[in-house]
Image (cartoon, rainbow, N blue to C red):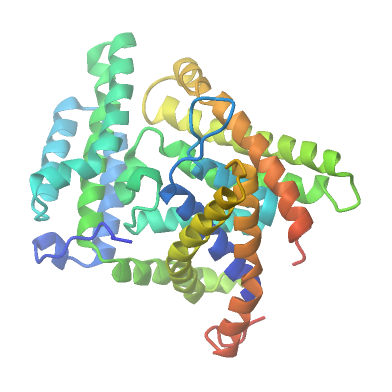
Amino acid sequence: MSTRDLVLTALFAAIIVALGLLPPIPLGFIPVPITAQSLGVMMAGVVLGARRGAIAVLIVLLLVAIGLPVLSGGRGGLAIFASPTAGFLIGWIFAAFVTGYLSERLINDRQSGLVQTVSFFLTAMVGGIVVLYAFGITYLATVAGLGFPKAFVGSMAFVPGDVIKAFVAALLGRAVMVGYPLLPARA
Amino acid sequence: MQSLYVEGNSAMHRLSPRVKLLSLAIFSIVLFITGNLVLLSLAVLAAAILYRMVGLPIGAALRRLRPIFLTIAVVALFNLLFNPWQQALVPPLRLTALMLLAAAVTATTSITAFIDEVTALARPLERTGRVRADDIGLALGLVLRFVPEIVDRYQAIREAHRARGLKVRPASLLAPLIILTLKDADNIAAAIDARGIRRHGS
């Protein structure tokens, strides 16, 4: 890994941590403010691509594990991984990876802005929702003993918020692509 | 950023980090093998005593675990509604015991000790040629160094929005934040290589 890639992943991890410290950003059209950290995971994928995005998320989880309260609400420490929702946390790594993997392959700078934005939205949906919830629900169903049907239904309440985040991530992915393109990743 | 480490000299503090992490791993495996309610209750009790020995005031000790405990309680409630209680109580007891011991390990292991341990753990992976163990400490240090800077930058962008009478929207706020932050990467990387911190930067 080049020094530049190392710094990029660390800076992005710092952005994800900072998103947990910031006051939630209100979204005009829904009353619920978004907590931006899971948005950060989707953004890691669309901005940095598969490998660097996943490593950025891994760094955040490492900070959690070594006892720094870097998750939103000042949560941290190894105890977080004993939570019934820890599957979503582990899933973050794979969510960023899949989002990034698809982004690297689907999007290039010859496409129109609309095509790029829509593609980013789809990749963030697949990575940040399908993959993430697959991990989260499996963990909730097995380790927390909830069983798949209930774990599935209970998790669905959070999908609408995450669809909006995927949309925001798509806008950001496109904006960063124009301002400071890092995709497709050059090894 | 305040770490969750608690200064002290308890028995847990004096154990080596490796022993603590290994014990935690073994503890979690044992917890997930057994389904015996008596054994699990004993495990919760033992972990609670260990966590109590850390030396945190009881209020602070509980406050740390409140968000995790709440999610465990919600899941436990759901379980109790739909399953016989003997079966429903197993997962929450498991997770509570694990949470308490994990919190005790976190509270008694300093960040430096943790980073050393993670680095040592990654050392064998170096042979694959894809990881450099010393990079882990460097990356973690970089994150801690730049979080306050990013928060400041976010505030500056927000102020700029206000000054121009623009609506504060996630996309218009975060896009400049990300672009400005990542543009620093080249300079920081050059600074790291100039100091030879990674020896032979590729």
Quadrant housing the N terminus of chain A: bottom right
Taking the spot 23% from the left edge, 30% from the top edge, the residue there is B93
Picture coordinates of residue A34, whole percent (x, y):
50, 35
Could you tell whether B120 is left or right of B74 in the image?
right
Could you tell whether B158 is left or right of B179 in the image?
left
Is B92 placed above or below B85 here? below
Taking the spot 82% from the left edge, 47% from the top edge, the residue there is A107
Q: Nearer the viewer, residue A31 or B23?
A: A31
Could you tell whether A166 is left or right of B100 in the image?
right
Taking the spot 43% from the left edge, 57% from the top edge, the residue there is A62
Number of callouts? 0
Q: Nearer the viewer, residue B105 or A67?
A: A67
Could you tell whether A171 is left or right of A34 in the image?
right
Quadrant housing the C terminus of chain A: bottom right
Picture coordinates of residue B87, whole percent (x, y):
27, 18
Visible in this render: residue A1? Answer: no
Picture coordinates of residue B201, whole percent (x, y):
63, 83
In the picture, residue A186 is in which quadrant? bottom right
Give the farthest residue toward the right.
Answer: A110
In the picture, residue B167 is in which quadrant? top right
Q: Nearer the viewer, residue A117 or A77?
A: A117
Visible in this render: residue A98? Answer: yes
Picture coordinates of residue A123, whole percent (x, y):
72, 39
Is B39 placed above or below A73 here? above
Taking the spot 9% from the left edge, 62% from the top edge, the residue there is B10
Q: Nearer the viewer, residue A16 or A142?
A: A16
